[in-house]
Image (cartoon, helix red, strand yellow):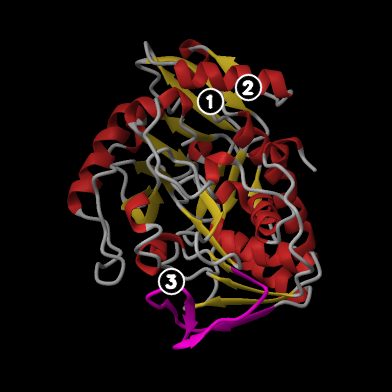
Amino acid sequence: MNAWACTGRPSTSRGRNTSAIVVGGGIAGATTALALRRQGLSVRLIDAWEPGHAGAASGGEHRILRSSHGADEFYTQMSRQARIEWLELGEQTGQEIFVQAGSVMLAREGHTAWEDASRDSLSKLGIPHFTVSPEELAIRLPVLDPTGIAYGLWEPEAGFLYAARGTIAAISQFKREGGTVERGLVTTDGAERPLLNGTPLSADVIVMACGAWMGDLFPRSLRRLLDVVRQNVVMVAPPAGDVRYDHTHFPTWIDHGNGAYGIPAAGGHGFKAVLVWHELSIDLEREDRTVDATSVARTRRYLSRRFPGLDDRPITATAVGQIANTADTHFIIDHHPQHADLMLVAGDSGHLYKHGPTIGRYIADVATHRQQTDNRFVLKERHRPELAKRPQ
C-alpha cells in the first residue's frame, strides 16, 4: 500500500463483493469503476450523458497536476503517485494525457506561508523542485511581470492533464478490461436510495460520484456540506509567432495572492487564465454555460498586470465549469450513514481531478472495505481552515 493510503486503517471484510455499480462518469467515477473492475468485480458505470460531455466538471480542456499542497503530505504524495498512474493510463490507451510542462507557484510578498510549507513538504518527500527569485523569474519567464512576488516555487516534473481526454481514456480502458457503460437517469428516493429510471439499483457495492449534483441527490446527507459554485475560464490568443506563452516555454502557474491560475497555450488552445470567485453560484439545470462580461473584464485586468503582453489579445474560447466545495476543501469519501452498501463521493473542491487514477483506487478500496476512509474524508460537518493548510 502506498504511504499516503496508510492513514486510513484497514477495515474488516464484510464478505466477498462480486458486483458493483458506479454512478457518474466523471474522473472520480471512471477511475473508481476501473479500480473496482481490477479487483475482479462485475462493474456497471452509469451516467446521464456521454463520457467527457461539456457540462461535466471533469470535462473541459485541461487541469493542472502538481504536488505542492502546503504542509499536507497526504495530498502531496497522492498527486505524485497520480502522475505515474496518469502516464501509465496514457501508455495503455495510446493517448497523451499528461504533459510535463512544469508548474510554478507564485508566492506573494508578505504572504508566503502556503508556498513555504509546500517547499518543506516537497523537500521532505524528495520531490524535485527549486525556488526562483523575482529577478530570475523575469529572465526565465520574460512575459510575466513579477511585481509583488517574493519567489516562485517551481516543480519541473509537474504540468497539466488533458481533462476530457483523460476521462474518456479511463472509461475506454474500463470497457477494454470488461466493464460496461450505460446511459440512464439516476435519482434517489425519500430514503436516499438510488433509482435508475425509477427502478432501485442493486449490487454488492454502489458508488455515487455525481459531482456537483450530489447535494441534490442526497439532500439530507450532503446538501448542507456542499457549496456549488461557477468556475469561469478564459483563453486568449498569444501574439502570432510568439512561442513564449506555449507549454514548451511556459509552465502552468498558480498565483495565490491574486486568486488566479492558468495553463500555457497547448493543443491548439489559447493561454488559459482562471480567476477564482467563490461567490459565483450556478443553477446546474437552468443556467447557460457562458462566461459573463464581468468575469471577462476581471480576467483582462489581471492579465494586463501579470501578463501585459496579453492585455489586448483576442479571446479564443471561454468555458464554465462547476465546483462542489466543502468548507475545508477535503473530499467526502464515505459510506452512506444508513446504507452500508452505498458509497458517497462528493466535494471535488477544485482539486480532485489531478489525483485521478490514484483517488479511484482509494475510493474502490474504501467501498469494498479493504480499508477505512481517512478522517479528512469522513461524512461530517466541516470547518474552513487557514490558507496555509488548504489543499487548493
From the viewer's perspective, tell me whether residue 79 is left or right of residue 59. Answer: right
Q: Secondary structure at mark 2?
A: helix
Nearest the viewer among 314 and 219 is: 219
Give the labeled residue for mark 1: 70
Q: Compare marks 1 and 3 and give the one earlier in the sequence.
A: 1
Locate the N terminus and report the quarter of the image it occupies: top right
From the viewer's perspective, tell me whether residue 33 is left or right of residue 245. Answer: right
The answer to whether marks 2 and 1 mark residues whose Cβ atoms lie closer than 8 Å is: yes
Q: Compare marks 2 and 3 and give the one earlier in the sequence.
A: 2
Three-letter amino acid code at disc 2?
Answer: Ser
Q: Residue 99, position in %: x, y?
A: 64, 46
Q: Residue 236, position in %: x, y?
A: 37, 48
Give the labeled residue for mark 3: 192
Residue range in magenta is 180-206
Q: Within 10 Å of the Cα at label 2, are there few (<14), some (14-19), or many (20+) other Cα atoms? A: many
Nearest the viewer among 272 and 355 is: 355
Distance of label 2 from label 3 (alpha carbons): 40 Å
x 31%, y 49%: residue: 314
Give the labeled residue for mark 2: 121
